[in-house]
Image: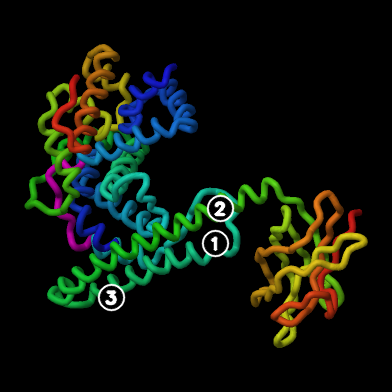
């Protein structure tokens, strides 16, 4: 089937009117053709005109109340593309959800207010809504960029594993690195002493330990983050370890080794 | 969410009622879709179309899904309730969708019928051809031309050559 023939199918596809074989062929084509995806999107947009052509039916007040109650019982969630989401990207998505949540929470309170108060606040909310949408969109783009970056990184990265040292026997960690970029994730860690954190080191035979970032685990004993370790040589065996160091980090390890390179069995 | 509801609920209920032919079921669908929209508000992608299209296609798809699930006999019994009741104007579609709305009214009846059977009844082109006793090629042409005109209206073009 030619591109022009696929284009002819886009209108019917937007209406959900393609029969099985044609639908399958177009969907396979859409996976690879941005122009046809745009054409389908334009057609979907146009189908909304069919709905707009109907005489509106005023919903009963009870329906609005039911929706508000159901929405209150529900939790907004973020379901982005199924890709690895770096831990530092989560706050962006959470912020987007929180912004909507705060706004909607305010709307819920309006239910108990009089009509005039509702009207006045509705105008304000309309303005706020546009801003919130902009912020959500910005957050989504940021997240998408981070996800893309993360996927590219993971495709190239090598992995090293770490096990817990003395005082952290249950801890396990993984380090992904490519060139100088290093991503660390670990679990089962105790809280470090006051003023201390966990510093990551790259270890290569015959070289001094190369310092990485200092991390602090969360209350559940997990830590994750990314940073640079300058000087990791290419083509050498690289292992990773974690020591207890001052929060500001040090150039050479001074504290106890809380995580050690996991030896291959 | 509240603003979305104020703006689109009347059109949403009209669409769901038109598809389902049952006001009670239509209200269920409107509730289901608006709650889902609330849950997924953070996922709304402005690059994929307008809010109006997002809401209305969600309503339409949920209604068609429901109609496919439910008992065919039930649908026949309730068919008499399919006509939406006229109500005062409520709900405010964006200007571009109002243009599409006007374009729908100007479509030749056979083209409008073809796309309405697809949109509101969930029929495929071959099912439309069988229903109308028309060749499949004729139905495909009607669908394509009708949607071409609606897209042109959406884009603000005066007319599209057939």
Q: Residues within 10 Å of mark 2 (few under 14, many from 20)?
A: many
Percent coordinates x, y for residue A5 in the rendering: 37, 19
Quickly name the residue at label 2: A147
Q: Residue at x 46, y 23 (%)?
A: A25
First in sequence, mark 1 or 3: give its number: 1
Give the CA distance from mark 1 to mark 2: 8 Å
- In front of the other: A120 or A249: A249
- Residue A127 placement: quadrant: bottom left
State which chain disc 3 sits on.
Answer: A
Q: Judge whether residue A57 is colored magenta.
A: yes
Quickly name the residue at label 1: A89
Q: Judge whether residue A38 is colored magenta.
A: no
Specify whether disc 1 shares its chain with disc 3: yes
Q: Which residue is drawn at 82% across and 70% down?
A: A259
Of badges 1 and 3, the one in the foreground is 1
Circle 2 SS class: helix
Percent coordinates x, y for residue A116 in the rendering: 12, 75
Circle 1 SS class: helix
- In front of the other: B106 or A238: A238
Percent coordinates x, y for residue A171 in the rendering: 78, 69
User: In the displayed structure, would residue B125 be above or below residue A126?
Assistant: above
Q: Residues within 10 Å of mark 3 (few under 14, many from 20)?
A: few
Contact? badges 2 and 3 (CB < 8 Å): no
- Residue A139 placement: quadrant: bottom left
First in sequence, mark 2 or 3: give its number: 3
A208 relative position to A10: left or right = right
């Amino acid at each position: 089937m030619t591109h022009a023939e696929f284009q002819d199918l886009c209108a019917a596809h937007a209406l959900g009117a393609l029969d099985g074989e044609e639908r399958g062929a177009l969907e396979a084509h859409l996976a690879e053709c941005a122009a046809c995806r745009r054409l389908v999107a334009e057609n979907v947009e146009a189908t909304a005109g069919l709905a707009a052509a109907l005489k509106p039916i005023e919903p009963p007040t009870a329906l609005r109340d039911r929706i508000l109650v159901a929405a209150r019982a529900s939790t907004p969630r973020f379901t982005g593309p199924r890709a690895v989401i770096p831990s530092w990207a989560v706050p962006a998505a959470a912020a987007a959800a929180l912004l909507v949540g705060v706004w909607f929470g305010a709307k819920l309170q309006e239910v108990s207010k009089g009509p005039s108060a509702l009207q006045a606040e509705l105008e304000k909310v309309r303005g706020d809504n546009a801003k919130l949408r902009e912020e959500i969109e910005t957050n989504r783009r940021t997240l998408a960029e981070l996800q893309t970056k993360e996927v590219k990184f993971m495709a190239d990265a090598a992995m090293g594993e770490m096990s817990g040292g003395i005082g952290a026997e249950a801890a396990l960690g993984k380090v992904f690195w490519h060139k100088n970029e290093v991503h660390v994730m670990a679990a089962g860690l105790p809280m470090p002493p006051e003023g201390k954190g966990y510093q990551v080191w790259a270890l290569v035979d015959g070289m001094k330990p190369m310092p990485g970032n200092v991390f602090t685990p969360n209350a559940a004993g997990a830590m994750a983050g990314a940073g640079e370790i300058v000087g990791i040589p290419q083509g050498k065996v690289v292992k990773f370890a974690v020591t207890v160091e001052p929060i500001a980090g040090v150039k050479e390890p001074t504290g106890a080794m809380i995580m050690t390179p996991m030896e291959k069995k | 969410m509240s603003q979305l509801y104020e703006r689109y609920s009347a059109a949403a209920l009209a669409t769901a009622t038109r598809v389902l032919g049952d006001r009670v079921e239509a209200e269920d669908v409107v509730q289901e879709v608006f709650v889902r929209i609330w849950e997924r508000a953070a996922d709304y992608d402005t690059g994929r179309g307008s809010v109006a299209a997002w809401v209305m296609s969600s309503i339409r798809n949920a209604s068609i899904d429901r109609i496919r699930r439910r008992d065919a006999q039930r649908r026949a019994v309730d068919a008499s309730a399919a006509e939406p009741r006229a109500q005062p104007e409520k709900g405010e579609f964006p200007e571009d969708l109002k243009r599409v709305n006007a374009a729908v009214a100007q479509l030749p009846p056979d083209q409008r019928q073809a796309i309405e059977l697809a949109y509101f009844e969930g029929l495929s082109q071959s099912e439309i051809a069988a229903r109308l006793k028309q060749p499949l090629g004729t139905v495909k042409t009607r669908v394509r031309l009708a949607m071409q005109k609606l897209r042109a209206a959406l884009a603000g073009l005066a007319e599209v050559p057939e």
